[in-house]
Image: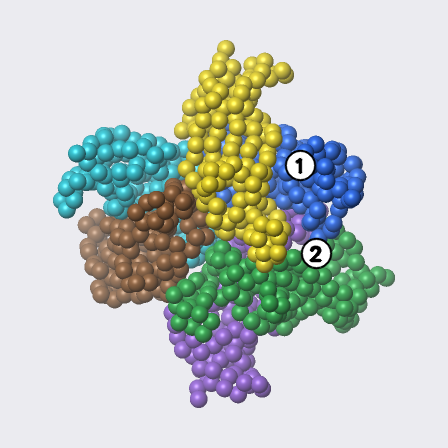
Chain colours: A blue, B yellow, C cyan, D brown, E purple, F green
């Protein structure tokens, strides 16, 4: 489950896709419990009936964390996560929706401060069962150069 | 717990700070279970002893979700979350570290596509018990304008 | 989130009301797991069909703990919880019911043994989505006097 | 696990004692997640160091729910729980303390409004590993009379 | 809850049956989280619709662990668990099925290597709400002989 | 993550090894909550001090479920799990032990009743941080033959 990849080994355009995962009421309850976010948007089915979406919505941080978890592949000991840019909650995810995530090498950049490393930008996208993108984010991976 | 605020009501520089929360082994175990990310960096205390940090590290998505949850204040029915920019994992968080989060109105921008809304940028920062910033992120809030 | 209040500052009749929270099957499963109470009243949907209520009932201690959690407001460093009187399970709570809790300052009493403190009695009530009171309890808060 | 007992069958003075259960950090984290009570008294080890008890304290509702769960014995189809009186948090419970619970038939009362039922008062006590009572409560059980 | 039984005290043919427990979506989500097994058979309701069973199936290890937990009776300090033979997943368990478990003393054997002990074989069976056996396993219990 | 393998494709002697996972107190608490097994061997640190192992022991079903989860590799749509033979709890697992699991193709057998299938026996072994085998089990996989 460990596989060494250097900056030079990442090829823009390559992607991997996860299996699907249905977002359950239990996931939302556990995420509220983990974060302390008990907003009625996620927890109060009655109030949600009075709102535009008519039903509870999964926390954005839940879908983000699930998508990141789904796209975690083999461990590259020469890479580490620097952060995320442009995390966007594009569509609401409802209880019962099924999420599949895709991770695509989007681009490679030099790291101006760290000459021995490069930045690999991975586009993480979560799609629902209708193929609609519900979340997108750019993962910044710092990766060692070969030489 | 609902409080209406319009775009005009947000004042750059104002901030709120959460109470603290100790990140426990149970939090890491529950986050692995929620995301499916059982990487040894988070789960294998023996392997971690052989690595630079010598101990298990909390998932970045856990600290992000906790910080977002900690700074969730009153509910503004005129605002909704658009996403996050510049999510940065600045320092590792270890089991037993205590996180306090701060949310500061950083700037206000027009939304070129939506004239009735404005973008409020909130800087979310998580600090550990030594006052070191461990995570930062810019929350983009779309807020209705008054008139 | 800390706010100092002395015994003299509590005004009988003032109350606060929480947002709502739908009691889910996941909540019941987690509460069974936390308490070890796997009675068929809570866990066996088939057996419950043969009983008067026809469906699973949430644990009384779950509704009590949720109501107490929902009414936890600002932290008063001059008060501490002494206990509860008259905890009453007035109506069953079913999976899918939505609970809103209200906390009302009911009365103030001298504490015969502790002259520097007074007893504030808070009435905690949990209501379901039809406005029916499902649980009531009197919270006894020991609060420092001003002088 | 079902055993029919009528009001006449309860003998004051009889008691049953549970096995022990160590209250873990995971229990406190799960209870915060179930109730939404993330007060620093339970969750912030750093802040607690500055307080009289020097360490995190388990939620009162956790200890109450655990004690009730521990003393749940055989199911009596002729009894149902009416509520609790005099719930008292007598001593703090710390992470790592081990709780054993005891349930004693304390007294039997007529129920003035329900002549076919009687009230059995069970004293529920939770003791820590030093034999100190940390919680007490009186459980009110409505039980059918024989005849 | 402790009850001493020697090898000689076990009578083949005696059995005990648990109360029922409905297997919930929350149980499946928690078991995935505990084991890291997020296979689509358990987690992806959309994909399951395309498969022979048309719906998600509980993990075999979940049903096994629940059945073992359900049949855990009194603690015998003179016995310890050696393992299981012939664990068989006979029928799929779906979300919403209700499991009742039965434990029958099936046979007693000498332990050729340990003359002071005997092997008690307990047949553990989990049945669903239609009385169909969904899981069977033979529990091997090493029990001290009387003398 | 799907990879078709026929009976003929399994080669005895091939094995795969998981990354490690530290068994935490949270895992034991969650497993008790999932199974209802709150035996003092797993839950009562004080009582355990008086027993030969001096500390709490993880549930056998927890280690079994974790080992099975750890060795879950790619999904073979032509195989399905028939059950387990010779599940053996060889050594106790304590809180803080780190488990690594290995799955080895042990043997291949005809299935007398199902000529289109064969039985692949996989040996599942869980090892602790000292390399000691703590659990072994033989997984019976029914796999379609090629022709």
* Residue B83 in the image: above or below residue D127: above
Taking E58 as reference, is B7 above or below it? above
Residue at image x 67%, y 36%?
A: A140
The front one of B116 and E45 is: B116
- At which x and y percent is residue A43? 48, 37
Quadrant in which the N terminus of chain D is drawn? bottom left
Badge 1 local density, few (<14 within 10 Å), some, or many (20+)? Answer: many
What residue is pinned by disc 2?
F73
Is residue B37 at all visible to an observer of this figure?
yes
Q: Is residue A70 left or right of residue D64?
A: right
What is the C-alpha distance between the residues marked 1 and 2? 26 Å
* Frontmost residue, D81 versus C65: C65
Label 1 sits on a secondary structure element that is: strand
Q: Chain of mark 2?
A: F
Among all residues in the image, which is located at the extreme right?
F147
- In this image, D12 relative to A98: left or right? left
**Residue A52 visible, this angle:** no
Residue D128, position as x, y percentages in the image: 32, 60
Number of marks: 2
Same subunit, labels 1 and 2: the answer reads: no
Q: Position of residue D143 (x, y in %)?
A: 28, 57
Q: Position of residue B34 (x, y in %)?
A: 57, 47
> Which SS class for mark 2?
loop
Which residue corresponds to mark 1? A139
């Amino acid at each position: 489950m460990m596989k060494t990849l250097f900056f030079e080994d990442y090829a823009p355009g390559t992607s991997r896709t996860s299996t699907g995962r249905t977002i359950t009421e239990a996931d939302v309850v556990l995420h509220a419990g983990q974060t302390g976010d008990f907003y009625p948007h996620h927890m109060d089915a009655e109030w949600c009936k009075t709102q535009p979406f008519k039903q509870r919505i999964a926390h954005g941080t839940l879908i983000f964390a699930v998508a990141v978890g789904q796209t975690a592949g083999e461990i590259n000991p020469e890479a580490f996560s620097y952060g995320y840019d442009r995390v966007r909650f594009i569509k609401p995810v409802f209880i019962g929706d099924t999420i599949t995530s895709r991770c695509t090498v989007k681009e490679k950049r030099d790291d101006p401060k760290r000459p021995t490393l490069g930045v690999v930008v991975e586009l993480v996208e979560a799609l629902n069962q209708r193929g609609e993108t519900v979340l997108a984010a750019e993962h910044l991976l710092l990766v060692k150069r070969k030489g």
